[in-house]
Amino acid sequence: MGVQLIAISVDPEDKAQEVADTVSFPVAHSVSRETTDSIDSWWDDNRGFVQPSEFILNGDNKVVFASYSAGPAGRLDAEDAIKMIGYMEAQKK
C-alpha cells in the first residue's frame, strides 16, 4: 500500500526489542511522557504509563484517523488499518 508503520514504546530497549523481534517495522523505545504528550497520546497518571494510541497520517503528515484505548480492547490492528487506508484512498477518487 506504500505506507510506513512505526511503533513507539515507553518500555526500555530490551523489552521493546522483544516486540521488535516479532514485527517487520521499527519500534522506538524509552519514549518519555514529554514525547507522548507531544503527539497527544493519553498518559494514565494513575498507572504511570501511556495508553495505546494509534494514528494514521496522510502524505502531508496530518492525522486523518486516531484511536485511543484504555486497555487491550479496541486497538487498531493491521487488518483494520489496511481497511481504513483503503477506504480513505477510495474516497479520494
Image (cartoon, helix red, strand yellow):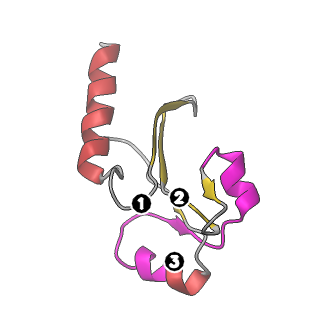
In the rendered image, which residue does mark 2 sit on?
Answer: 51
Which residue is painted at 30% across and 34% down in the image? 84
Q: Do the numbered discs 1 and 2 sit on residues whose CB atoms are within 8 Å?
A: yes
Kindly identify the amino acid type of the residue bearing the numbered disc 1: Gly
In the rendered image, which residue does mark 3 sit on?
Answer: 16
Which numbered marker is on residue 71?
Answer: 1
Which is more N-terminal, label 3 or label 2? 3
Q: Closer to the camera: disc 3 or disc 1?
A: 1
Q: Is mark 1 on a helix, strand or loop?
A: loop
Which residue is painted at 55% across and 87% down in the image? 14
Quarter of the image with the N terminus in it = top left
Tell me where residue 60 appears, x and y as whole percent: 57, 28
Tell me where residue 63 appears, x and y as whole percent: 53, 32
Q: What element carries label 3?
A: helix
Which is more N-terminal, label 2 or label 1? 2
Kindly identify the amino acid type of the residue bearing the numbered disc 2: Gln
Q: Residues within 10 Å of mark 1 (few under 14, many from 20)?
A: few
- The CA distance from mark 1 to mark 2 is 7 Å
In the rendered image, residue 61 lying in the magenta stretch gets the answer no
Task: State the residue lying farthest toward the front.
Answer: 46
Which numbered marker is on residue 49?
Answer: none
Residue nearest the viewer, comparing 60 with 49: 49
Q: Can you tell which quarter of the image residue 56 is in?
A: top left
**Range of the magenta residues?**
16-41
Which residue is painted at 33% across and 50% down in the image? 74
Quarter of the image with the C terminus in it = top left
